[in-house]
């Protein structure tokens, strides 16, 4: 059974940093990719950063240069380092995993989700 648990969200001021963590258990075979998504109330969940099975990272345009996705295989943990946070980064952030080599671009292809961790950026 695959379990995904996020942590690290919180409230910060614009320009500050946060690091989100996501522990994934139960995924024992490759390939699998992982990603960080965010969602505002009433809006569709969007992929913020993805990590292919070979470690290739992709980012949504608005976070390029500010966010960094990384993984510690020894700890089964995915991270999202968020720097220079902006008001528009405020959202619920979700971690997800999928058994594909490349990050899927459709939400329905991500079967494993965490419960989400909130990020609030204020001025």
Image (spheres, rainbow, N blue to C red):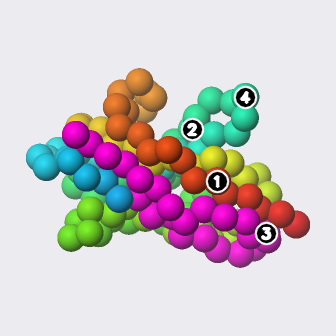
Determine the CA span between mark 4 and mark 1: 15 Å
Region rendered in magenta: 1-22
Please name the residue shown 35% across and 27% down the image: 109
The label shown at residue 46 is 2
Reading the image, the residue beneath label 1 is 118
Q: Disc 4 or disc 1, which is closer to the eye?
A: 1
Reading the image, the residue beneath label 3 is 14
Q: Disc 4 or disc 3, which is closer to the eye?
A: 4
Q: Is residue 21 visible?
A: yes
Q: Point out the tag, 2 or 1, that comes first from the N-terminus.
A: 2
Q: Secondary structure at mark 4?
A: loop
Q: Are marks 4 and 2 in contact (CB under 8 Å)?
A: no
Q: Which quarter of the picture shows residue 18?
A: bottom right
Q: Secondary structure at mark 1?
A: strand
Determine the CA span between mark 2 and mark 1: 15 Å
Image location (x, y in percent) of residue 79: 43, 64
Determine the CA span between mark 1 and mark 3: 15 Å
């Amino acid at each position: 059974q695959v379990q995904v648990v996020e942590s690290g969200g919180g409230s910060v001021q614009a320009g500050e940093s946060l690091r989100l963590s996501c522990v994934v258990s139960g995924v024992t075979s490759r390939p699998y990719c992982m990603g960080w998504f965010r969602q505002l109330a009433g809006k569709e969940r969007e992929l913020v950063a993805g990590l292919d099975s070979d470690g290739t990272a992709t980012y949504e345009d608005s976070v390029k240069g500010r966010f960094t996705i990384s993984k510690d295989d020894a700890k089964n943990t995915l991270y999202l380092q968020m720097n220079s946070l902006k008001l528009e980064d405020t959202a619920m952030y979700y971690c997800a995993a999928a058994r594909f080599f490349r990050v899927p671009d459709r939400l329905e292809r991500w079967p494993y989700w965490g419960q989400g961790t909130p990020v609030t950026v204020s001025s």
